[in-house]
Amino acid sequence: MRLRVAMLFGGKSVEHEVSVITGIQALRSMDTDKYDVIPVYMTKKNEMYIGDNIGKIEAYKDIPSLLSSSQRVIMMNDNDKVVLMPYPLKKFGKNNAVEIDVVFLAVHGTNVEDGALQGYIKTLGIPFVGCDVTASAVGMDKFIMKAILKEYDVPVLDAVTYSLSDYADIEAILDGVEKKFGYPVIVKPVNLGSSVGISVAKTRAELTTSVDDAFRYATKILVEPAITNLREINCSVLGDENEAEASECEEPLHSKDILSYEDKYVSNSKSGGAKGMASVSRKIPAEISPERREEIRSLAVKAFKALGCNGVARIDFMIDEDTDKLYFNEINTIPGSLSFYLWEPVGVPYKELLSRMIDLALKRQRTEEGITFSFNTNILSSASFGGSKGGKV
């Protein structure tokens, strides 16, 4: 019997559109002999829809029309089974719920990749593909991630963070950055991906603009030194915190100081095809020495395990060509296009990659089923608040 997989994409995120591309790409490559796949679209209001056209990329040119021809649903636990229940419920007649076995998360960004959605799905009690709640949250917070990796001797650049309360005195932010790092620096929202809100500042005026822009997308920002003579190398990892392997390495090519959102998703899609991260100009394999390649692949696996990741992730590294030093830059716990283009060169077709990700989700579920989360107690039988004045239990 085929597993019924809910391929979930979209959601309330600035990376909403990228997620739609990733989800439908994966949907088209799933092994239909093993899985019955149901595409589930989350709107920017986090409403879920299913329907005949939800899995068709062309339908997203007119989303209001798409939704009007689709069925809104709620994911819920009903008698120990997780279902997609039509909403609003019919007062008369049968509500035809769709039972699902696994949720495949193809989402990107704040509110959906950062542990919030993972926590909701975990509470429902259904296995889901990708990192668990903690790893998802840590992977999205660039500062906490750095702190953890330092404990595992993974090289990262120093950084400082600023909150909205700091933003009330932007001059103090500028003075602090100039005193600690000088120029150039790179400014980032602390919890976004896809290069949204990220920019390089080489002067005080540019830093002001960068800080303003980053705070448009987050309540907390991060500032770190910008490597002037930079070379970027990326590597994907597949597995869990116990066993993982690395993909081929790539060198993405970009038009500015950093790989921008336009470089990733716009500039190479002029033909009209929706290819997501698969459309980025890149060199695969990266033109690096065998020794550096293995260093990066080994460090990628080390970081993946240290952060407690699961499924597939992409880890971005930086090489300072002036010093030849290698630094971990960031991890994408649900990378655009699921980094399938990095696995095919090492003999893992996209269809197999997706199946292995589902297997990892089921493995985690089996492991957690063996853990005790509750025990019998009679504490409530003797509980009392001691009348209106209260008291000890």
Image: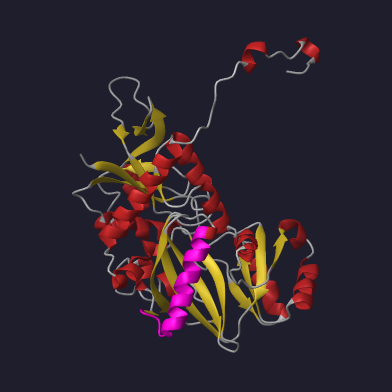
Stretch in magenta: 284-305
- Judging depth in this view, the residue of 217 and 389 nearest the camera is 389
Residue 55 seen:
yes
Q: Quadrant of the C terminus?
A: top right
- The residue located at (47%, 70%) in the rendering is 298
Q: Is residue 325 above or below residue 193?
A: below
Identify the residue shown where x is 33% and y is 49%: 359
Residue 270 magenta: no
Q: Tell me: 330 left or right of 92.
A: right
- Location of residue 366 by image quarter: top left
Q: 320 left or right of 178?
A: left
Q: Position of residue 161 (x, y in %)?
A: 70, 64
Residue found at x 47% / y 40%: 122
Residue 165 position, x and y percent, is: 76, 57
Can residue 261 be seen from the camera position used here?
no
Residue shown at 52%/32% (left/top)?
373
